Image (cartoon, grey):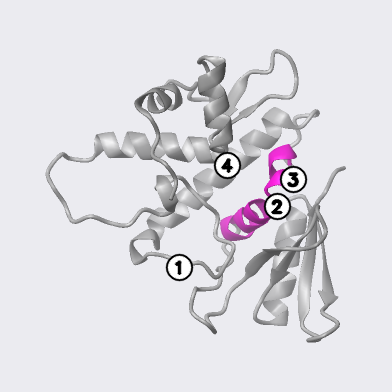
Amino acid sequence: MTRPLTAAQRRLIEAADPGTGRLKGTEAQLTALVKRGLAFRHPRPPHDHFLTPAGHRAREAQAQAEAEPSEPSEPQAPASTGGVFAARAGGEPVPPAAEGPARMREVRSAWQGMLELRRMTNPDASTDRPCAWERTHLVQAAALALEAAGHRPAGAAEGEDGYRVRETPQPDAVAVHAPDAPTLRACVETLEASGWQAGEHTEPRTRRRYVLASPRRV
């Protein structure tokens, strides 16, 4: 289980620039946030630190918790472990409380954060192709692009249809599985529109079709 944020980490996230997500703190504090996936170090001088999409979600969760009334209420399961947004790759258990309009708002916010991350870290400030963070988190990045476009991830139970994003032996590609040909083609279109190279392939053993996708570089 993800360790809860310390009070100092919560203060740093809360104090981040509301527009850019720029962080200020000691090197040790910023490094700790980077290790937790809540911040990244800009590759160009002066190498400032900024919130990742997960960091933005953590800050929003803090703000929401502070705005909620103090009266006791029935506990609800968080949308993801530790209260930090996580894209659904398909096949994971999903608490009922994490479904519906609230989840849709989380996904839209995370996708906007990802576009901002692209703008901040791609050398030409381009938002139409994946950034370095996405290239090192292929499954999460592809799953976010699909979920943000309205595709439904597969449920945890056997036979629950939907997309599934999985790692492959190739270091720069993921496999996307879908229950039928139209859904598979729709996934290809979504990934291509999100800056990925995607194409349909056939598994030699099962003859099942799947999508092989990798982040576009140009």
Q: Nearer the viewer, residue 18 or 46?
A: 46
Location of mark 3 (residue): 135
Location of mark 1 (residue): 93
In this rendering, would 200 be left or right of 143?
Answer: right
First to last magenta residue range: 131-148
In this rendering, would 188 be left or right of 114?
Answer: right
Q: Which circle's residue, 4 or 1, is located before the other in the chain?
A: 1
Q: Position of residue 98 (x, y in %)?
A: 38, 59
Q: Nearer the viewer, residue 11 or 17?
A: 11
Q: Image point 28% across, 56% down: which residue?
A: 76
Location of mark 4 (residue): 112
Badge nearest the viewer, 3 or 4: 3
Mark 1, secondary structure of its residue: loop
Helix, strand or loop: magenta stretch: helix
Location of mark 2 (residue): 138
Q: CA distance from mark 1 to mark 3?
A: 25 Å
Q: CA distance from mark 4 to mark 2?
A: 17 Å
Residue 7 visible in rendering: yes
Q: Does the stretch in magenta take in 151?
A: no
Q: Marks 2 and 3: in contact by CB < 8 Å?
A: yes
Q: Position of residue 48 (x, y in %)?
A: 63, 18
Mark 4, secondary structure of its residue: helix
Q: Which circle's residue, 4 or 2, is located before the other in the chain?
A: 4
Mark 3, secondary structure of its residue: helix
